[in-house]
Image: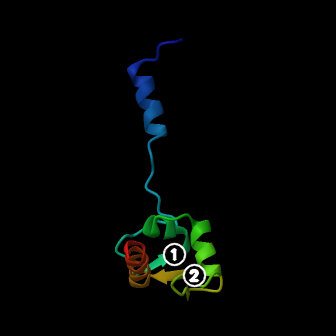
Amino acid sequence: MPKHSAAAKKAVASKHKPREFEGRYVYDPRAEIVREVHLPIVTGMSQTACWRHRQAGDFPPAIQLTKRAIGFRRSDLEAWLKRRELARSA
């Protein structure tokens, strides 16, 4: 295995350093509206599980943000999770 100089390692490291992601799907924990893609972070369930609860009518209502984007009120999600927690412990 060839040995690389410190300068070569530094050059490679600088090329591959992580960039700040400034895309449209960045999660903001302070946001009042939670995008569908961030439901797993907030609920602890997969997007598929959230979708199944929505289809069954057992999920907080979605808010139509644009023609193709929906979101959920954080307060509705937290209240829904609390109700599920209380129902489990009863």
The image position of residue 4, as x and y in percent, is 46, 17
At label 1, which amino acid type do we have? Arg
Please identify the quadrant where the C terminus is shown. Answer: bottom left
Q: Which of 9/23 is in front?
A: 23
Report how far apart the C-alphas of labels 1 and 2 lie in the structure.
Answer: 6 Å
* Name of the residue lying farthest toward the left: 30
The numbered dot on residue 35 is 1
Q: Which residue is depicted at the point 45% across and 69% down?
A: 43
When asked about the image quadrant of residue 77, the answer is bottom left
Question: Who is closer to the viewer here, 61 or 29?
Answer: 61
Asked if residue 50 lies left or right of residue 16, the reply is: right
Query: Residue 52 falls in which quadrant of the image?
Result: bottom right
Query: Which residue appears at 55% of the width and 74% of the height?
Result: 36
Q: Are the residues tagged 1 and 2 within 8 Å (C-beta)? A: yes
Give the image location of residue 24, x and y in percent: 52, 69
| Picture quarter with the N terminus | top right
Residue farthest to the front, as pictured = 90
- Counting residues from the start of the chain, the first of labels 1 and 2 encountered is 1
| Amino acid type shown at disc 2 | Ile
Residue depicted at 51% across the width and 75% down the height? 35
Give the crowd class for mark 1: few <14, some 14-19, many >=20 residues within 10 Å.
Answer: many
In the displayed structure, 26 sits above or below 82; it is above
Residue at the spot x=45%, y=24% of the render?
Answer: 8
Q: Nearer the viewer, residue 4 or 79?
A: 79
Rendering coords of residue 13 (x, y %): 44, 34
Crowdedness of circle 2 by 10 Å Cα count: few (<14), some, many (20+)? some
Which label sits on residue 61? Answer: none
* Residue 31 x %, y %: 39, 77
Residue annotated with mark 2? 70
Quick one: SS at disc 2? strand
